Amino acid sequence: MSSSYVPSPPTEAPVTIARNAFRLLALVDVSTAARRVLDELLYLSDPETGTAEISQNEMCAELGASKPTVNRGFKELRECGLAWRLGDGRYQLHPLLTGGAVSSPVMAVPEIKAVDPESFTEQRRARYAAQTANLDATG
């Protein structure tokens, strides 16, 4: 019988994401699997470096997802510029999501690939409107 260890966050302090980052996240078209991986990376992120440490097996255990699903989530995050791999089990989150925190001041930071809302399907347009409704209401 094997068990999986899932790391805990480096701090229990709340993760703070700027309002403009939420609007941008609503424009990034990723699967539910990728969003779940991103949410877990944000939970585990170190506020000083914007990095998260978790192995593929640990992520699978935490999300209750298969390796192909988790791999696809990581791949989507890398392709859209929200997070990328630094080494075995170590990931850098985009500085927009970490309040500017990065593990190295000389790191190349990719552009986040957002989608023009005008190109959304009707279903995606409705989801975008719901995602941004609270942002518009609170300013």
Image: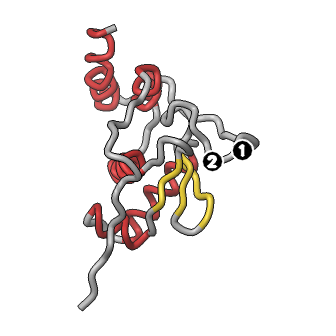
The 10 Å Cα crowd at callout 1, few under 14, some 14 to 19, many 20 or more, is few
Q: What element carries label 1?
A: loop
Determine contact: label 1, label 2, CB under 8 Å.
yes
Point out residue 30 in the picture as x, y percentages from the top left corner: 42, 44
| Nearer mark to the viewer, of 1 and 2 | 2
**Position of 23 compared to 128: left or right?**
right
Q: Which residue is drawn at 33% across and 48% down?
A: 32
The disc placed on residue 107 is: 1
Between 124 and 89, the one lying in front of the other is: 89
Answer whether residue 112 is visible to the viewer in this image.
yes
The 10 Å Cα crowd at callout 2, few under 14, some 14 to 19, many 20 or more, is some
Q: In the orientation shown, which residue stands out farthest toward the bottom? A: 1
Q: Residue at x 39, y 31 (%)?
A: 16
Q: What residue type is labelled 2?
A: Ser
Q: How many marks?
A: 2
**Position of 95 compared to 123: left or right?**
right
Q: Which residue is drawn at 50% across and 36% down?
A: 98
Point out residue 58 in the picture as x, y percentages from the top left corner: 37, 69
Answer whether residue 118 is visible to the viewer in this image.
no
Between 76 and 119, the one lying in front of the other is: 76
Residue 126's image quarter?
A: top left
